[in-house]
């Protein structure tokens, strides 16, 4: 049976984005015209996921409301002659089933994934962080490539990685790949365009936020995972780590130490990860998506150009 269940943890406090996240989820912040989590769901749907299991927490009900069919809003749009706006609600009609469970205490990402266990059962699952978009406008089929690789290699886990500047390794979970990296097999027929398929490698270890001098690579975990259900047993055995939280990284390390076959797959440069977890990368993502907007992008580009030119002229005066 193809993997079609994705767990999307969205229960975090989002403290790095305060005050924006005081009473709204960071996963609902807009990037261009859509909230972050809508991109995540659209990406998962285009990679073959059919069941989306959100792990939510306090203050996250707007996520549930966002994916509901809003009959009242639809009739208001019809009655007020705004039918053209109905297409903005098309995503509500995707052939997806939504499930929600609560992480009652925010004990970390690993704990959030563990909360999904009773609903996920005994099948392989995708985990996609609800605060990260892959590719401009979520135009990425990395999850499909990961599930293909997972099945082809009979892996215990497949994890997406992105290359980051060496000085930034201190912020991420960093791969220790078994060297040398082996090129991945050619993409299946019909996906010839995707010659950008990332390199696939065996993971020897995963180091959480290493010092620059100690980092075994500059490949950082990039918010998408595929796991055999064994991950739940490992999470249940994982003691709280940094900040008293149960870290997904620790459970993955345990998997590797117990002889599990854990693979990494590198995101191609064209499918960057947009991390909406801090203001610096959130602002950059917003500007990039807004500039790429077919309707509003050109005017924004003109505005930014003249704004920056004026700033430079002022600075010279
Ligand atoms: P982060 O690691 O960015 O944590 O979460 P956070 O708590 O949301 O943010 P900060 O550090 O306080 O700013 C990555 C993803 O994992 C989810 C978040 O909602 C986010 O989508 N998460 C994190 C949970 O679901 N539960 C947790 O306990 C922690």
Image (cartoon, rainbow, N blue to C red):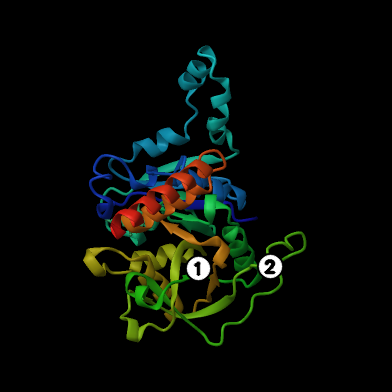
What is the quadrant of the C terminus in the image? bottom left
Q: Which label number is shown at residue 159?
A: 1
The single residue placed furthest to the right in the displayed view is: 189
Q: Which label number is shown at residue 195?
A: 2
Instruction: Identify which residue, 193 or 176, lies in the foreground.
Output: 193
Q: Is residue 98 left or right of residue 106?
A: right
Q: Quadrant of residue 271?
A: bottom right
| Cβ at disc 1 under 8 Å from ligand 1 | no
Q: Is residue 253 left or right of residue 203?
A: left
**Secondary structure beneath disc 1?**
strand
Instruction: Identify which residue, 137 or 62, lies in the foreground.
Output: 137
Q: Position of residue 306 (x, y in %)?
A: 42, 48
Q: Can you say whether 286 is above or below 144 in the image?
A: above
Q: Can you say whether 6 is above or below 30 in the image?
A: below
Q: Position of residue 41 (x, y in %)?
A: 51, 46
Give me the C-alpha separation between circle 1 and circle 2: 19 Å
């Amino acid at each position: 049976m193809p993997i079609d269940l994705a767990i999307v943890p969205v229960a975090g406090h989002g403290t790095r984005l305060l005050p924006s996240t005081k009473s709204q989820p960071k996963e609902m912040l807009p990037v261009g015209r859509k909230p972050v989590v809508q991109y995540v769901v659209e990406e998962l749907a285009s990679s073959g996921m059919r069941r989306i299991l959100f792990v939510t927490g306090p203050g996250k009900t707007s996520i549930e409301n966002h994916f509901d069919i809003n009959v009242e809003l639809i009739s208001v749009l019809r009655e007020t002659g705004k039918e053209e706006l109905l297409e903005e609600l098309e995503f509500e009609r995707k052939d997806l089933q939504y499930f929600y469970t609560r992480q009652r205490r925010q004990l970390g990402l690993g704990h959030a994934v563990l909360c999904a266990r009773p609903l996920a059962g005994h099948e392989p699952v995708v985990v996609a962080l609800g605060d990260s978009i892959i590719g401009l406008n979520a135009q990425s089929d990395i999850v499909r490539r990961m599930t293909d690789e997972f099945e082809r290699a009979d892996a215990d886990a497949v994890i997406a990685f992105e290359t980051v500047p060496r000085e930034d390794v201190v912020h991420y979970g960093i791969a220790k790949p078994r060297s040398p990296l082996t090129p991945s097999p050619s993409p299946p027929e019909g996906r010839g365009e995707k010659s950008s398929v990332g390199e696939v490698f065996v993971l020897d270890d995963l180091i959480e936020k290493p010092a620059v001098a100690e980092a075994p690579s500059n490949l950082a975990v990039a918010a998408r995972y595929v796991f055999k259900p064994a991950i739940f047993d490992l999470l249940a055995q994982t003691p709280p780590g940094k900040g008293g939280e149960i870290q997904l990284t620790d459970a993955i390390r345990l998997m590797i130490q117990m002889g599990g076959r854990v693979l990494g797959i590198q995101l191609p440069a064209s499918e960057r990860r947009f991390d909406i977890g801090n203001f610096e990368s959130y602002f950059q993502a917003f500007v990039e998506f807004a500039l790429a907007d077919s309707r509003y992008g050109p005017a924004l580009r003109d505005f930014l150009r003249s704004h920056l030119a004026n700033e430079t002229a002022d600075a010279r005066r």
